[in-house]
Amino acid sequence: MSSSSTLPPWFSRALDALWARDLDGFTSIFAPDALYEIPFTPTGPVRLQGREEIGTFMRDLLDSGRLRYGSLTEVRAYESQDDLIVEAVARHYRAADGSPLDLSYIWFVTRQDGQVSRFRDYMNPLEISAI
């Protein structure tokens, strides 16, 4: 497993698309039947099945108006064949007043035939509940 402080280009482009509110660009990395899991959230686990459900969830998150995406820092990416593990801190901004909010993430991503088949998103629910 190789380690890097940069993300693979396909993953970086997907995050850039998400943060630019381009949901088609973001969801294009997912297989039609992909599984997206967020085990720890302030309201309980989230399990999304399929590209369409993932896109709807992300649209609702973007449209909630609580958070504006920023950029990643402290990136550590580990890649081996079809598996990617990313540790990062994201500098986001509270929509209400523009104040910064740092969120810690760990992502486990599995690809099959060049598309994401499973994405496990571990973020700190204590940090997200601050917005």
Image (cartoon, rainbow, N blue to C red):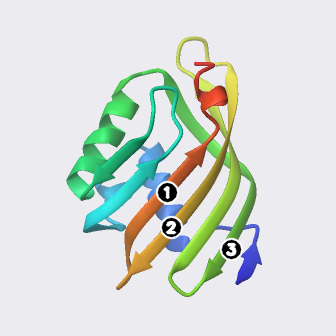
Q: Residues within 10 Å of mark 2 (few under 14, many from 20)?
A: some
The disc at residue 109 is 2
Q: Earlier in the sequence, mark 1 or mark 3?
A: 3
| Residue that badge 1 annotates | 120
- Measured in 3D between alpha carbons, the distance from the residue under mark 1 to the one under mark 3, in whole angstroms, is 15 Å
> At 73% from the left edge and 58% from the top edge, which residue is drawn?
75
Q: Nearer the viewer, residue 24 or 124?
A: 124
Q: Residues within 10 Å of mark 3 (few under 14, many from 20)?
A: some
> At 60% from the left edge and 39% from the top edge, which residue is drawn?
70
Q: Is residue 11 visible?
A: yes
Eye-nearest disc, 1 or 3: 1
> At 28% from the left edge and 55% from the top edge, which residue is drawn?
24
Residue furthest toward the top? 97
Q: Nearer the viewer, residue 45 or 32?
A: 45
| Residue that badge 3 annotates | 78
Q: The N terminus is located in which quarter?
A: bottom right
Q: The C terminus is located in which quarter?
A: top right
Q: Nearer the viewer, residue 69 or 103?
A: 103
Indicate whether 81 appears above or below 57. Answer: below
The three-letter code of the residue at mark 2 reads: Val
CB-based contact (under 8 Å), mark 1 and mark 2: yes
